[in-house]
């Protein structure tokens, strides 16, 4: 039986909501553990590692918000770099800092990202593989997960989602997607597994 750990993030920056957190609130299942991670470098990594140790999942999918995107985007690569002008929710800014000193430059997702994109698109929700998760919290947690699980059979990775319609007022001019479409996309990924 596949046991899935599914995480989202708290709101950050100028946002008062985060679609990734709203999605995980709507996903329930016997073999699914959900959690909302803090948008803070140190705490988010610690919390994710605790959740993995506590629940021993076979699959870890982390979700996050990507302003400006129009599609559900499973990420292909996590890079060993924190580099963002935006401070995390603890006020910490990291520029040009490796996540793991001496660690590999990058890790690949071990989720079936191409199958995800095919299935999500077939379900009527726009999706595409992304080649960059950025260098803020989403990439951070992605890299931490891939490093922690590198010698295991656990499949893990990260999926960015667009802003949701309810955020249009806070992000004028940026594309949004209805939350139920995003929930459908995540349910579709769980079916693929
Ligand atoms: N998106 C940010 C961090 C938290 C989130 O939901 C990112 O893309 O790094």
Image: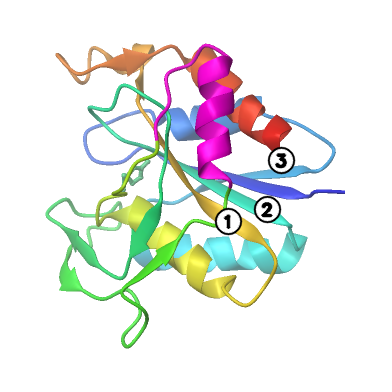
Residues at circles 3 and 2 in contact by the CB criterion of under 8 Å: yes
Say which label, 2 or 1, has the lower sequence index: 2
Is disc 2 in contact with disc 1, using a CB cutoff of under 8 Å? yes
Measured Cα–Cα span from mark 3 to mark 2:
9 Å
Q: State left or right for residue 22 relative to residue 135.
A: right
In front here: 76 or 147?
A: 76
Mark toward the start of the polypeptide (3 vs 1): 1
Q: Quadrant of the C terminus?
A: top right
- Mark 1 residue element: strand
Query: What numbered label is drawn on residue 59?
Result: 2
Q: Nearer the viewer, residue 168 or 160?
A: 160
Label 3 – label 1 distance at C-alpha: 12 Å
Q: Residue at x 35, y 56 (%)?
A: 139
List the residue tagged with mark 3: 193
Quarter of the picture for ligand 1? top left
Residue at image point 74% right, 30% down: 28
On whether residue 52 falls in the magenta region, the answer is no
Q: Which of 113/166 is in front? A: 113
Mark 3, secondary structure of its residue? loop
- Reply above or below: 47 against 177: below
Residue density around tag 1, few if under 14, some if 14–19, many if 20 or more, within 10 Å: many
Could you tell me which secondary element the residue under label 2 belongs to? Answer: strand
Residue 183 x %, y %: 57, 22
Q: Which percent across, then down, holds residue 192? A: 69, 34
Residue 80 quadrant: bottom left
Query: Where does the magenta region start and end?
Result: 112-128
Frontmost residue, 42 versus 119: 119
The correct choice, above or below, for 153 with respect to 170 in the image is below
Q: Which residue is mark 1?
A: 156
């Amino acid at each position: 039986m596949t046991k899935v750990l599914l995480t989202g993030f708290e709101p950050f920056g100028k946002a008062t909501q985060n679609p990734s957190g709203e999605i995980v609130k709507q996903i329930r299942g016997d073999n699914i553990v959900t959690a909302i991670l803090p948008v803070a470098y140190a705490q988010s990594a610690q919390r994710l590692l605790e959740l993995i140790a506590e629940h021993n999942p076979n699959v870890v999918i982390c979700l996050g918000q990507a302003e400006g995107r129009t599609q559900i985007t499973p990420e292909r690569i996590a890079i060993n770099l924190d580099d963002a002008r935006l401070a995390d929710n603890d006020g910490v800014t990291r520029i040009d800092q490796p996540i793991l000193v001496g660690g590999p430059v990058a890790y690949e997702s071990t989720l079936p990202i191409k199958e995800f994109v095919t299935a999500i698109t077939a379900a009527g929700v726009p999706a595409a593989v992304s080649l960059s998760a950025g260098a803020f919290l989403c990439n951070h947690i992605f890299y931490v997960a891939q490093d922690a699980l590198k010698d295991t059979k656990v499949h893990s990775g990260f999926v960015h989602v667009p802003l949701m319609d309810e955020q249009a007022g806070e992000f004028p001019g940026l594309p949004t997607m209805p939350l139920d479409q995003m929930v459908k996309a995540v349910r579709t990924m769980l079916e693929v597994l």
